[in-house]
Image (tube, helix red, strand yellow):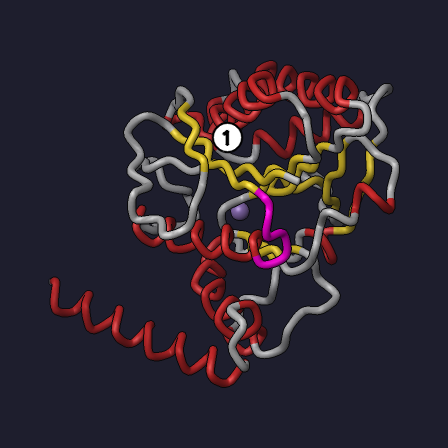
């Protein structure tokens, strides 16, 4: 199984939040570690642009450069994903996932359990029922999954005259449109509660391990919680030790920031 994410160093930060590149790389690194914890042999590819500096990453990733329009990040991501698929095909199942996610279970069992070409995560949300952070393509019948992706990208390009949508959330509208009109690919709709879970935005929500959750998604300012969950439940330390380790690191980082300004 292969894992592919997207990250660029850009000033056009998400409207809901501003976190700097160094911080994003830390999250990306934890995401990669979580993938490797449950899939030791898996490769992780980062789709990025020519100028983004990934040298601070302390985990092995394949860097793949694509053209990126900072004003249309999500559309650029979809185009880069499509270019990746055209370049490599689907020799194995491939999961496109966000950098602000932690993998919390072995996902390679999904293709063994279900017959599908494309797996997406759905939630109760009228405008955006499908979250764009999780898109799994199975390799059982590659043309079907690739066909779906091409129709998704076409739907995205079609609505991209709306500049806001090309920047953020356009992927989710386009996915919903592609799903609604799909006739060929076998779609597997997975519950967000299990495969794309957004935890409560409280530090205390990180206390317990989520054994029922295969993927955690630290949206918006939940990103600050991602290292806490990692150190408490995935780093391989006893939770109390992991949490203490996180607390010491957070304190040191805060002091370093103070000293710098
Ligand atoms: Mn995300």
Q: Identify the residue at image location x=69%, y=37%.
A: 136
Q: In which quarter of the image is the C terminus?
A: bottom left
Q: Would you say residue 159 is visible in this rendering?
A: no
Quickly name the residue at label 1. Answer: 74
Label 1: how many Cα within 10 Å (few below 14, some 14–19, many 20+): many
Q: Identify the residue at image location x=45%, y=41%.
A: 61
Q: Does the magenta stretch include residue 31?
A: no
Q: Identify the residue at image location x=43%, y=28%.
A: 64
Mainly helix, strand or loop, the magenta region? loop
Q: Identify the residue at image location x=43%, y=45%.
A: 60
194 w.r.t. 200: above or below: above
Q: From the viewer's perspective, is 26 left or right of 92?
A: left
Mark 1 and ligand 1: say if the CB distance to the nearest ligand atom is below 8 Å: no
Q: Is residue 39 magenta?
A: yes
Residue 185 placement (x, y as % from top left): 82, 24
Residue range highlighted in magenta: 37-42
For the residue labelled by badge 1, is the local secondary structure a helix, a strand or a loop? helix
State the count of labels.
1
Q: In which quarter of the image is the N terminus?
A: top right
Residue 256 placement (x, y as % from top left): 19, 68
Q: Would you say residue 72 is visible in this rendering?
A: yes
Identify the residue at the far bottom of this view: 240
Q: Quadrant of residue 137?
A: top right
The answer to which of 121 and 33 lies nearer the viewer is: 33
186 w.r.t. 7: above or below: above
Residue 112 placement (x, y as % from top left): 84, 44
Q: Quadrant of residue 221?
A: bottom left
Q: From the viewer's perspective, is 140 left or right of 43?
A: right
């Amino acid at each position: 199984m292969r894992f592919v994410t997207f990250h660029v160093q850009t000033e056009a930060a998400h409207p809901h939040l501003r976190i700097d590149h160094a911080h994003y790389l830390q999250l990306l690194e934890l995401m990669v570690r979580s993938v490797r914890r449950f899939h030791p042999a898996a490769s992780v590819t980062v789709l990025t642009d020519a100028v983004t500096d990934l040298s601070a990453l302390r985990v092995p990733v394949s860097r793949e450069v694509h053209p990126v329009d900072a004003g249309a990040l999500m559309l650029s991501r979809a185009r880069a994903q499509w270019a990746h698929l055209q370049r490599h095909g689907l020799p194995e199942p491939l999961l496109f996932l966000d950098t602000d996610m932690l993998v919390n279970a072995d996902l390679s069992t999904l293709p063994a359990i279900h017959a599908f070409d494309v797996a997406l995560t759905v939630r109760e949300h009228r405008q955006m029922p499908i979250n764009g952070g999780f898109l799994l393509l199975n390799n059982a019948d590659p043309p079907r999954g690739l066909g779906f992706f091409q129709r998704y990208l076409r739907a995205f390009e079609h609505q991209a005259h709306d500049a806001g949508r090309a920047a953020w959330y356009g992927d989710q509208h386009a996915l919903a449109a592609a799903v609604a009109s799909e006739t060929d690919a076998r779609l597997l709709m997975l519950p967000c509660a299990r495969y794309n879970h957004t935890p409560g935005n409280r530090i205390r929500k990180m206390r317990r391990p989520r054994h029922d959750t295969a993927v955690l998604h630290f949206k918006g300012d939940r990103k600050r919680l991602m290292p806490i969950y990692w150190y408490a439940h995935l780093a391989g330390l006893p939770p109390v030790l992991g949490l203490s380790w996180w607390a010491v690191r957070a304190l040191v980082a805060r002091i370093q920031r103070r000293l710098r300004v």
